[in-house]
């Protein structure tokens, strides 16, 4: 329900009032931070230290569309060994099982849905709302430079697995984006949700994060050329040698200040095109990881890895034009 004190500007997608959702998020985070580290079952310590909990996904990025709250919570811990995660066939699952056990016994309103290799999916029935949550875990790095050095020296086929670990920098990247571009992102997500209804299932559904990065790049290009945003976005999607990375135009202040890694570092780990480089994890080609099929009613995850089937996106992308007719580049 929209707050009477918040009135969206003409042409904007209404920004959802997140009071109830944020209360729910606060209660989940508080429960984990205060009680999980010391959690013991049958004299065996199940809990582990919590360095930080990051609100990621659309809520953390400030790009939620009303009625479709995409909440990813990432629990960072210095006790999670990145090397162990890399070597284990179960990856993050052993750590997720421990949090699952805790939440099932300590968080009132917790309703389990699915335990995956990279996430614990559940519904949280809070007095103010019901939200779907993807809870993930991550080792802690002091800086993105330390994270980058780790990525360089692990097998190439393991690097994308650690995209969840860069959530904190993804949130920071989005915090630096202007409000105007977030309106375009919301509209693009509305188009995606209409074109790929979750209840029906389908192939080639673009993730929220892929949409976000494509919209930011198309927005910047359209502003610099004073052209059509929709046509720039369509052109990017159809570009055979797509090459999206960050901070390569030295004259573009906005592009430079959104950079965590040097341009040479961004393409070092992803030398082949087409590519949409994750600004927070330059080993993650979001052009591949951000496209996947799904079953009817299945929850799509931003960190599951993709299948690279772009044909449905190529077939549907031109229908996006009408969703931007009321917005102006600012």
Image: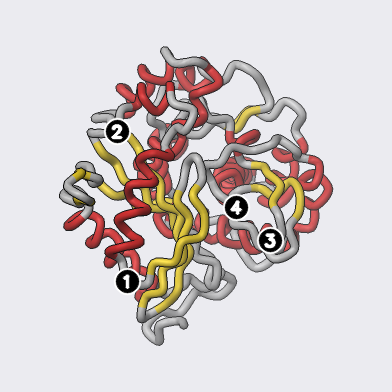
**232 or 56, which is in the foreground?**
56
| Element under disc 2 | loop
Foreground: disc 4 or disc 2: 2
User: For the residues marked 3 and 4, what is the alpha-carbon distance in whole angstroms?
Assistant: 16 Å
Residue drawn 49% across the image and 65% down it: 69
Question: Can the viewer see residue 249?
Answer: no
- List the residue tagged with mark 4: 300
- Name the one closer to the observer, 207 or 200: 200
Q: Are marks 3 and 4 in contact (CB under 8 Å)?
A: no
* Alpha carbons under labels 4 and 2: distance apart: 25 Å
Q: Residue furthest right?
A: 315
Q: Identify residue for label 1.
A: 108
Label 1: state its secondary structure: loop
> Reading the chain from its start, which is encountered first: label 3 or label 4?
3
Task: Point out the tag, 3 or 2, that comes first from the N-terminus.
Answer: 2
* Tag nearer the camera, 3 or 4: 4
| Residue at the (37%, 53%) spot, across then down | 100
Q: How far is disc 3 from disc 2 in space, using C-alphas?
A: 38 Å
Q: Considering only order in the chain, which callout, 4 or 1, is on the residue closer to the N terminus?
A: 1
Residue 15's place in the image compared with 271, above or below, is: below
Residue hosting label 2: 80
Question: Which label's residue is closer to the chain start, 4 or 2?
Answer: 2
Answer with left or right where residue 239 lies relative to residue 148.
Answer: right
Label 1 – label 2 distance at C-alpha: 26 Å
The dot on residue 191 is 3
Q: Is residue 176 above or below residue 268?
A: below
- Whole-angstrom CA distance, mark 1 to mark 4, is 25 Å
| Residue at the farthest top position | 153
């Amino acid at each position: 329900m929209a707050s009477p004190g918040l009135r969206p500007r003409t042409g904007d997608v209404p920004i959802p009032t997140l009071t109830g959702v944020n209360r729910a998020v606060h209660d989940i985070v508080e429960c984990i931070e205060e009680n999980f580290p010391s959690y013991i079952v049958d004299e065996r310590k199940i809990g582990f230290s919590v360095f930080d909990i990051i609100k990621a996904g659309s809520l953390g990025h400030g790009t939620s569309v009303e009625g479709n709250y995409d909440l990813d919570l990432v629990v960072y811990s210095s006790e999670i060994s990145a090397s162990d995660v890399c070597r284990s066939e179960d990856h993050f699952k052993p750590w997720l099982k421990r949090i699952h056990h805790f939440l099932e016994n300590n968080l009132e309103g917790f309703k389990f849905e699915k335990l995956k290799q990279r996430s614990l999916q559940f519904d949280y029935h809070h007095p103010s709302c019901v939200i779907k949550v993807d809870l993930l875990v991550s080792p802690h790095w002091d800086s993105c430079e330390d994270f980058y050095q780790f990525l360089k020296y692990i097998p190439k086929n393991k690097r994308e697995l650690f995209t969840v670990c860069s959530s904190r920098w993804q949130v920071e990247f989005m915090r630096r984006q202007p409000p105007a571009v977030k309106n375009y992102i919301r509209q693009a997500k509305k188009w995606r949700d209409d074109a790929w209804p979750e209840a029906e299932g389908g192939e080639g559904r673009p993730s929220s994060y892929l949409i976000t990065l494509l919209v930011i790049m198309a927005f910047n290009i359209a502003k610099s050329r004073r052209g059509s945003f929709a046509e720039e976005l369509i052109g990017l999607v159809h570009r055979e040698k797509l090459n999206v990375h960050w901070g390569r135009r030295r004259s573009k202040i906005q592009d430079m200040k959104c950079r965590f890694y040097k341009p040479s570092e961004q393409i070092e780990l992803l030398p082949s095109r087409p590519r949409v480089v994750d600004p927070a994890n330059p080993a993650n080609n979001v052009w591949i990881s951000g496209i996947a099929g799904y079953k009817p009613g299945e929850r799509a995850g931003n960190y599951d890895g993709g299948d690279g089937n772009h044909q449905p996106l190529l077939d549907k992308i031109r229908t996006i034009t009408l969703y931007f007719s009321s917005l102006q580049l600012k």
